[in-house]
Image (cartoon, rainbow, N blue to C red):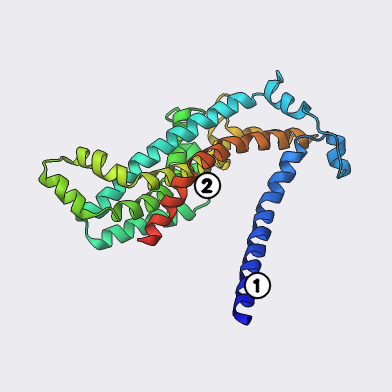
Amino acid sequence: MNGPVSRQGRIALTHLVLVAAAAIVIAPVAWTVAAGFRTQISLLMGEFFFSPVWFNFAEVLFSKTSDFLLNYRNSLIVGIASTALCLAVATLAAWSLHRMRWPGWIVHVFLAWTLIFHMIPPVALASAWYAMARPVGLDNTFIGLILAHTTLNLPMALWLMSVFVRDVPRELEEAARMDGATTPILLRHVVLPIIAPGLAATAVLTFVFSWNEFAVALTLSMKQTATVPVAIAKFAQDFEIQYTQMAASAALSILPALLLLLVAQRYIVKGLTQGAVK
């Protein structure tokens, strides 16, 4: 009797902890989204019950003084391009590290350096990148932002892809080599289909990190190339903070990452657990 009861108690406690953790994560997001439907007076007065309004979203999306749709487009361009670059470079680099017979110490030193670089706060690199980008005309350009975001997210992408490429069965590669497959054909028809879940997981994480990056985008961009995080920050002005418009733009900024996570959820879970299981 004690066994089943204690087991049910542990399950109930586990579910309670998970619900509490989910509430901690969801509550700030729900509050922000709800704030987007409030008036400024209602929000500042702290009213619990309020009548929803659409003014803030209309102001953010359709106002003549708002560039939010342009910022949205800029973030999509930078996020998609930097993610594609990260996937291509990280996959080829991981293949080189685990299949090109590098000495073991070189592989370990290289991966350790990428990990150390990933720990450096982006704000510490922003001024240096601006100093390098301005003389060559890459400040306030998509190319400069894309290269910066690729550099920031490449260490994470490399670590993830190293796990998936390392776990590709060598027997399949050797069989393909015996059939006359060249390296590009081997990568395209043998390796990439196997590591597809890992590519999906890495792509989603890389895109989300690029979409949310603020410090470098603020330093390297201006009005024409500013991204969504920079646009949200501009609602905090010198003499007024437009809280409700800021909340509405933050709620809209969640949509691409949320849609991407919902579409690729199955592949993300499979990709993130594949290396651990093996």
Residue 13 at x, y percent in the picture: 65, 68
Q: Quadrant of the C terminus?
A: bottom left
At 55% across and 26% down in the image, what residue appears?
A: 73
Count of residue discs:
2
At 21% across and 42% down in the image, what residue appears?
A: 186
Q: Nearer the viewer, residue 259 or 150?
A: 259
At 31% across and 61% down in the image, what residue appears?
A: 108
- Viewed as shown, does residue 109 lie left or right of 23? left
Q: Determine whether 108 is above or below 270 in the image.
A: below
- In this view, which residue lies farthest toward the front? 1
User: What amino acid is labelled 1 in the image?
Assistant: Gly
Please name the residue that numbered disc 1 is placed on.
9
- In this view, which residue lies farthest toward the top? 64
Which circle's residue, 2 or 1, is located before the other in the chain? 1
At 77% across and 39% down in the image, what residue appears?
A: 35
Q: Determine whether 263 is above or below 157 in the image.
A: above
Q: Quadrant of the N terminus?
A: bottom right
- Viewed as shown, does residue 115 lie left or right of 101? right
| Mark 2 residue element | helix
Please name the residue that numbered disc 2 is placed on.
122
